[in-house]
Image (cartoon, rainbow, N blue to C red):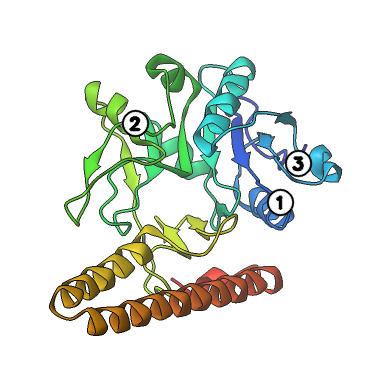
Amino acid sequence: MDPLATASPPDSPTLHVATVHWRTDRWIDVQRAYFRRNFGLPYRTYASLEGVDASHQSKFDQLIDTPGKHAEKLNALSEVMLEKAAPTDFLVFIDGDAFPIAPIGDWALDVLSHYPLVAIRRDENMGDPQPHPSFCITTAQFWAEIGGDWRKGHTWRNETGIDVTDVGGNLLYILSERNAEWLPLLRTNTVNLHQVMFGIYGGLIYHHGAGFRQAVTRSDWTWTKKLSLRTSQESAKSTLRGRALHRIANRAMRRRTSANRKLNDKIYRQILSNPEFFKDLL
C-alpha cells in the first residue's frame, strides 16, 4: 500500500482507486508517485495487471485477475471496491496512463458535496458526451445505487454524423435515465500537441491517451477516412488517378502514425525526467 499523509482528519473518506495496466509496467511507478503527491486523502489501490510482470503486484493493495476488455476489468474492480468501501467513501476510476497533477483531496470533498459523480468528458474526441474512465470519482453509495457500468452499448451520434459507442456509454445512459446531474471535467490545455492525446482536464488530471496501445485515435482515423473518401471520388472519375491518391492517403496515415508514436515517446521521457512536465501544456 502507498500510505498517504497522516495529516488527514480521522473521519476523512478513503479513496478506493481502480486502475488498469496492460502488457507494460512503464506507467506503474509514474502513476504511484503522482498518487502520493496529490491525492491528499487516505487511499487504497486496486488494479488489473494483465501481461505485467508479477514483481509489481506488491505495489497495489488488491489485484484482480479478470480477462476481457477494459470496461469489464473496471466493472470487476468496482465490485471489489464496493466490498471494501464505506458508503461515504469515494471510488476513483483512472486509466493507467493518467494521474492527478494537482492536489485533489479538498477539491474532491467539495465537488462531491454538490455532484454525485465527476468524470472526464472528451468533447475533443469527435464530441464524445459520455463519462470517460481516464478519470472518474463518485461515492461508493451512488455507484452501488445506480449499478454503475463502464461497458459500451448506448450509442450517440458524433460530430461526423456517425452513430458510435465507447467505454462509458452505458454509464451515460444510466445517468441520463436517472436525470443525475454529473460534472464533466473538460480539456484545459492551452498547448495542444495532439487533438486528443496529452490532455489536461480541469487543471487537475493528466491523461496521456496512448499509453497502452498504438498512438492513433479516432480523430486520426476520421482524418484518414476523409482522405479515402476523396480518393474514392477521384477513382470514380479516373482509376489511375484514384489509385495514386489512395497511395498518397496511405502514406499520409503512416506518417501521421509515426509522428504520433515519436511524440508519444518524447512526452513519456519528459514525464520521467521532469515531475512538472505538464506546465508546458497549461
| Residue with the mark numbered 3 | 2
Could you classify mark 2 by the number of other residues whose Cα lies within 10 Å: few (under 14), some (14-19), or many (20 or more)?
some
Q: Amino acid at mark 2?
A: Gly
Q: Residue furthest right?
A: 55
Helix or strand or loop: what does disc 2 sit on? loop
User: What residue is at 78 percent from the left and 36 percent from the top?
Assistant: 1
Q: Position of residue 233 (x, y in %)?
A: 16, 72
Horizontal arrangement in the rendering, residue 59 relative to residue 64 (left or right): right
> Which of these two is toward me, 6 or 211?
211
Horizontal arrangement in the rendering, residue 239 relative to residue 113 (left or right): left
User: Could you tell me how far apart the alpha carbons at marks 1 and 3 are, in whole angstroms?
Assistant: 12 Å
Q: Amino acid at mark 3?
A: Asp
Q: Is residue 115 visible?
A: no
Q: Is residue 199 visible?
A: yes
- The total number of labels drawn is 3
Q: Earlier in the sequence, mark 1 or mark 3?
A: 3
Of marks 1 and 2, the one in the foreground: 2
| Residue with the mark numbered 1 | 28
Helix or strand or loop: what does disc 1 sit on? helix
Q: Are marks 1 and 2 in contact (CB under 8 Å)?
A: no
Q: In the drawing, what numbered circle is on residue 153?
A: 2
Q: Earlier in the sequence, mark 1 or mark 2?
A: 1
Q: Amino acid at mark 1?
A: Ile
User: What residue is at 46 percent from the left and 39 percent from the top?
Assistant: 136
